[in-house]
Every structure is written in C-alpha cells, then in structure tokens.
Amino acid sequence: MSKKLLEVNNLKINFKTYAGIVQAVRGVSFELYEGETLAIVGESGSGKSVTSNAIMKLIPEPPGIYADGQILFEGRDLIPLKEKEMSKIRGNDISMIFQDPMTALNPTMRVGKQITEVILKHKKVTSTEAKARALKLLELVGIPMPEKRFRQYPHEFSGGMRQRVVIAIALAADPKLLIADEPTTALDVTIQAQILELMKDIQKKSNTSIVFITHDLGVVANVADRVAVMYAGQIVEYGTVNDIFYNPKHPYTWGLLGSMPDLKNNVKEALRTIPGSPPDLTNPPKGDAFAPRNEYAMAIDYEVEPPMFQVSETHFAKTWLLHPDAPKVDVPEAISRRIEGYLKEARS
Amino acid sequence: MANKLLEVKNLKQYFGPANNPIKAVDGISFEIYEGETLGLVGESGCGKSTTGRSIIRLYDITDGEILFKGKNVLDTKSRKEMKEFNREMQMIFQDPYASLNPRMTAGEIISEGFNIHGLYKNKQERQARVAELLEAVGLNREHANRYAHEFSGGQRQRIGIARALSLDPSFIIADEPISALDVSIQAQVVNLLKQLQKERNLTYLFIAHDLSMVKYISDRIAVMYRGKIVELGEANEIYHHPIHPYTKSLLSAVPLPDPMTERMRERIPYTHEEPGETATIHEVKPGHLVFGTQQQINKWK
Amino acid sequence: MTQSKQQFDKIAPEMFTIVGGRQGETEKLSDKTVSFWKEVFLRFSQNKLAIFGIVVLVIVTLMAIFVPIFSPYSYREQLGIYNAAPSAAHWFGTDDLGRDVFVRVWQGARISLFIGITAAVIDLVIGVLWGSISGLAGGRVDNIMMRIADVLSAVPYLLVVIILLVVLKPGLIPMIIALSVTGWINMARIVRGEVLSIKNQEYVLAARTLGASTWHLIKKHLIPNALGAILVTMTLTIPSAIFTEAFLSYLGLGVPAPMASWGTMASEGNKALTSAPWRLIFPALFISLTIFAFNAVGDGLRDALDPKLRK
C-alpha cells in the first residue's frame, strides 16, 4: 500500500456570525494516500468547501475558529502552524485550484509571470530556468503555442484555457497534494471533460494526490478513487468509488443518486428526491441531522447521533440502519434497478 | 398529432453595430406542440437564452417570425393585445436570488401580475389565489408575508414558478431554471415542473446546458451551437442516435454516476467546421432534423 | 474511524421502528419576519458613531429652531457691549457690533442647515430625474444626457459659482442656485448606475414579461431598490453643501449682513482671532460638528444598507 499523505482527524470548524455560531464542519475524519483522488461530495452548506479551505489554512480567523481536530500532512499537524510556516507549505507542498478561473488569475499580469513567480518563490532556480519550467508546464496542461501564450494576459484566454493556466500555476512547485474546489463547475461540459482528463493525466505522471470537491456525482464517478459524502458538516458515507455507487448504504446517498435522471434506461418516472431543506447549522438538530428528510428515519434518529458503522474494510456509513437491531431496509428499487443495469452492461 | 402552439421561423437576433453585429441567434426555426416540452441545449454563449428572451419579446428581434397560436406576435402592437400575450406566455428565470425583488414579500411577488392586469381586486379573493399558488408549488400559505431573502434557493425558485403560473399561461419558457440549484433541489423542481405540466396542460420550452436533465424532462430536444440549431429530434433519438458531430461531442462529455462507464469513457472532440453557404436543414428520419450540407450529413452518418 | 459498537448495545428495540421524516420542519422559516428596512434600522442602531451623529443633528436642529425664538436677544440687536468674552449673560460672548454670539450661532445654524438641506433636495430631484431617465432610456439619450453632465462638471466649479454670485448678487437664493448648478451631477451619476444595474435584474425582466408598464417598473422595482443609494448620497450631500457655503462665505460671497450663516460668522470672527477668539471658535466648532455628524450618519446608513461593504 502506498504512503499516507494526509490525515484529518475529527476536524471541527465554527464561524461566528450575527445569528450565532455556525458549526460548519462537525467532526470530519478522512485520510488520503499518495497518488490517490478523494472526492468530497455534498450540497451547498454541507461543509465540503470549508473542509478543503481548512486544509490550506485559508479559514479567516475571525470569524472562523478551528474548534477541534488535527490536519496531519506527512505526519505534521498544520493547525498550530504560524502563517509564515504555512505560506511555505502553500503553493509548494499543497496547492489549490479554485472554481472560478477568472478570479483566480491576476488580470494585470502576464500569464507567464504568474507561473514563474510561484516557481521562483518555492524553488531555488534562476529566472531562465523558471521560464523554461513554466513553458513546460503550459505544454503539460495542453496549451498550444506556449511561447506565445506565455506573454499574454488572462483576458486573452478562454474559460477552459484559463482553468488550464490555473492548474499550471498550482503544479508549478510540484505539490504533493492538489486541492481542487469545484474546478469544473463554471465550465461547459465539453471543457469539463477535457479538464478532468488533464487532471487524471497529470496525476498519472506525477503521482500527485488530489482532494476533489464537487456536487456532481457524474464527475465523482469519473475522477475519484475514494469518496466522502458530506451532509450538514459531517461525512455520512465513506468508501471506494465502487462502494458508494454500486453499494450505497446511507439514505442521503440514495437520495443524491435518485436525484439524477437515469439516462441509460430510458425511465420517465418521477425522480426520487430528498424532500425538505438542509438544516440550519447554527442549531443542528438533535440526533441524526438527516433524519427529518429521511423517509426511513427511526425513533432513535431523533435522539442519538449515529456512529460510523463499518460495512466492509473500505466502506463506512453513519446511519442507524446499519445497526444489527434495525429493520432491514433495501436500497430503493429505482436505484437498485439502475445499478444492476450498470453492472450488467459492465459485465458484457 | 397535437396542435402547434408556437412556431419560430428563421429567427435572428443580432446585437451591436449593424455593420459588424454579434449574431447571438442566427436564423433558427422550430415548432412546439401543445402539451409537450421542447428542450433547448447548448453551451454558454450559444444563444439559447437569447432565443427564449426573444420569443417572449424581452428583445426586439432582428428578423424572422414568431407565431403563437397561429398569430404573429410581432403584430401585437396595442397595449391590450400585448397584455393578452403576456397572460399566455410566461418565463421562469435562472437565478433564484436575482429573480425576486428583495424588497417584496412572496405574496407581493406572486400577485404582481394581478396588479398589472387588474385581476382579483377583492382582497380576500386575491389572498386565496396567492395561497392556492403557494400550495401548488409546495410552499405554505403563511409564507406569503415573508421576504424573498428569508427563503432558501429551492424555495425561491418555487416562488418564481408560482409567479409564472399566476396569470394561468399556456406556455412557459424555463430559462435554466435548475442550473443554480443543488442536485437534490434540482430534482424537486423538475418533478414539480412535470407535475404542474400534467395538472395544468402546460407547454414548456426548457432551456439548459445540462443534457441529462434536459433528456429526462423533454419530449424533443434541440441542440444549439453558435446561434444555430444543429440538430433537433425526439429526446431518445438525439440521445441514442446523434448525427451532428457537435451533438456527439456534447453527449460524450456528460458524466454519468457510474464509475465503470466513466473509466472507459472516450470523449469525442469536436472541431468547428464552417457549415458553408449551402448548408440547410435536412430531415434524416421523420422528425429528426440535422443542419449541414448533404455531403456533410452523409459523412456524419 | 468507527466508534466502538458496545456503547450502543443497550438501545431499546422499539427505538428502531421506522417513523419516517419530518420534512415539514425543515421547510420552516425562522419565527419572526424582518423586512429589509427593519433590518437596516437594526443594523444602523448598533452603530454607535451613527447614533451619536443622529443625536448631534437632533440637538443642532432643535437649538436652531428654538434658541432664536426664546432668546432674550435678537440676532441683529446691538447690545452695546462689544467683543465681550463668554459669560453667564452671553454664553458665547458678543461680537464687534455688540451682538450676542450664542443667538447668532443658532440663527446661523438655521441659514446653514436651510442651505444644506435645500441644496440637497434640489440635487435629489434633478439628479434622480436625470439619472433615471438616462439609465432607463439607454442608448443615444443616455449618451447625450451623460455628456451634458460631463461638460458641466468639467467647468471649474468655483468659477461657475463666483460668476453666478457676482451676477445674481450674494444672497440666500443665489447661494442655493450656485450650489445646485453642478451639485446634482453626482446624484445623477449614482442613480443612473443603480438604474442600469437594476433594470437588467431578472426580477425586472420578470415584471416585464408579466406586462408591467414603465411606470410600474419605476414605482415597484427601481425606486425601492435604488432608495438606499439615493438616501446615502443625499445624507452625504448636505454636509458638503454646508461646507461649500461656509467656504464661499469665508471668501466674502456669503449671505449679506445682518443675516448670518456659520460661514459669514467665521469669516468675520477670523479678523478678531487674537482679541476675541470666541467669535471664530464657536461657528467653526459647529460647522465641524455638524459636518462630522452628517458624515457619520451617511456612513452608518451605507453600512446598514449593505453590510457586505464593511471592512
């Protein structure tokens, strides 16, 4: 097995607001190995972006508070680090790709300079070497005519090309960990497919680990090795990509899968949705936060928060349905039918 | 076959200077039948939203004809005729935050049309109608007195739908109504739209960039690229037997929630090919239209 | 990753009956509804500086109204005591013509506040009309209207005012006209900007698809949403008008004697700076205090209207 690069233990992050303290992340734990992609999937307000920003120590304090937990990067806890030490890690060992390629680039600076700046900051190289490396990076991310593009400004690039530049900057210092926060959400599907291909390609070449934040299950299926499904500031299901898509155990995961139309088996029946709205995290509900929206909620769900139950060696889910005394509830028929369809197609 | 409700003929919408215009919509034609949903897909900047806004007359069109119930809507010049048109055709907008006036309550937003058209002048009657609309979209009648900012994104979009329904239209243009919403909320809204369509015999033009939802909700799909409709046909036909290379490329890029398919996914790249002067609409199968020259189409097949 | 299962072994079996969701609870809104303006008021009232500004303005206004009425002296009455220092009889002393400075300061406040508020109201009317027509019409009309404003604001302001005051003879009305000639341009630009951004908002498009008339759009959508910016601009126009009036008076272009504004008083007091400093200090103090108060209120209002702008 490859080396463990990142380990997050019981991370809790709060925000102080006018309305009270928002518990944005409520005890999140996961780990990431070298060369692996972990997708964190969830809806807005689930705490997925806060989690990824927390790894980069990008939570503004105040109003943010690291209330509890550890973020171990190569065995070293990042939370107590001073800003100065952290800025050495940022961009060097860990770098980040943001959702909007427009705001991630400086509009008044040539693209080449933005890349070489990062290289010069983190590597002991001359400016000629930095330029050579920057050109290589532009080529690596699939930008044609890098020599010419090097001297251009961001506004001369299309959205997809801009995101490639952002990726080139993120890769400038050979990071061990790449955090991608919805990197394709602002892009068209055809451009999204290209960027996803590019990221997988780069990962193969440089063995980078990736934390990929997204709300799109299709994208998750495309990029992830392992998946963490987040709801209301907690991971509710955690496993390999096959565990999550072919053997989902948490009713919230069922809901997410059911919300997507089944394209292959031309089904026209109503989508299975998750009724209601997500909870207010200034005052999280007692017990299981998902219970009020869960048609399979049991009496206990309104009283006691469920633990993480282990389904298999790699698969965990935070639902009382997995307790031995709980009634046996199967995956909803619409979803199991779809999964069977997928598996049958894969076998043939 | 159902009646034609809307007929768009050679619609052109240009912006900017006359000698070098931006051709947002460049001569498109299609029909929408009563009770059906036509999905209009394409990537950002292809002209799909402009098409919707031109049909509902938010823009003055550059050229072409729009026939609604057999009548050319460009002929409706008087205020009275225009108001009749407004009652028949309504729109649902993309951004649940920008589409509701932050200074108005849900009730005021939904009853705005009543003020404009002088309907339900009796206060009780009006309240009852607002409550009925709120309940039709799955909200509470008590929500009428709440301000827009108090609602979540999905709830706001429901208020927008209730507003579109307030004048009892027969045709609704839904301009990317779900793209700003979370996955589970998208499904709620799509289910609601389908249910309302059945209950009220509505006809939809559903504009979106997300092919999977469009395929699910639409009876027929029109694929738009650079201001032109390049392919139009039954939803299943377009999905399973696309002909135009752009459609093929678009379909090959849609990720599915199925890891094994995704691992084997092969994206079909598309390089733009000028359609040329002689390119026209060809009916390759009954109801399946493709834009191109005869040679191109033979090659694509 | 897993918590030990043992600690949950004692759960009663009936806890595992499926009771289903309570989705109604998740759709609930908070108990009390808060309108936009009420929220603005709440935020505003938490701003100590702005509240201080309001208190100052209320006191200054009340004093300006009542002191000249109830004072034993009139502002033009020559009492025969020249340049007397502040005392129990004359709180702010007297001037070189033997007039009571206390009553003159509050009489001056009337003139200064009147000029400031009137100029701001005129700016408001012209600016809102000009800006909203320009923004709504767009295209060539917009272009012509904004170029006119540009040309006007390019002419040196002081020159225009001085010429106007020379032609019209110094006085209250000419002063207000002078202040308004170019004063409205700022308001017009701000209103135009607001209108341009609001008119393309989806809620305005939605109202148009419902068949709304232009008047309906202005009344229901444009004004309510531009009101905040208009209010802030107006609150900040008043102190700048008061300041300009004081400045022009200082140059000798102010209201003629025996009328007094804070500016003319300061100008006269300046001559006796060493012998009777109270004649300068008191009007100067109230000019500063009032301008500060208006600015504090204006800034407080802006923060309250758009909390995101803060910091």
Image (tube, rainbow, N blue to C red):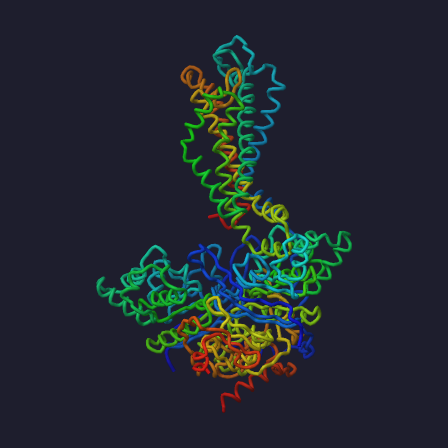
Q: Position of residue A14 (x, y in %)?
A: 51, 60
In front of the other: A191 or C139? C139
Q: Is residue C181 above or below residue B298?
A: above
Q: Quadrant of residue B72?
A: bottom right
Is residue A232 shown to the viewer in this render?
A: no
Q: Is residue A134 above or below residue C187?
A: below
Q: Could you tell me residue B8's position as x and y percent?
A: 58, 66
When the figure is inspected, residue A308 is found, relative to residue C159, above or below; the finding is below
Which residue appears at 58% of the width and 42% of the height?
C45
Residue B27 point in image, percent of width and height: 51, 66
Image quarter of residue B153: bottom right
Side (left or right) of A255 relative to B263: right
Residue in the image at 44% along x and 16% along y: C276
- Residue A263 horizontal/vertical position (percent): 55, 79
**Is the N terminus of chain A in the top left, top right, bottom left or bottom right quadrant?**
bottom left
Q: Residue furthest front?
A: B278
Looking at this view, is B142 or C53 the one in front? B142
Looking at the image, the residue that sits furthest to the bottom is A348
Residue C78 visible, this angle: yes
Q: Pick whichever, C114 or A18, lies toward us.
A: C114
Q: Is residue B93 left or right of residue A198?
A: right
- Residue drawn at the location 43% of the way across and 31% of the way down: C157
For the image shown, how many numbered marks are present on the structure? Answer: 0
**Extreme-top residue of the structure:** C80
- Left or right of residue C169, residue A323 in this image: right
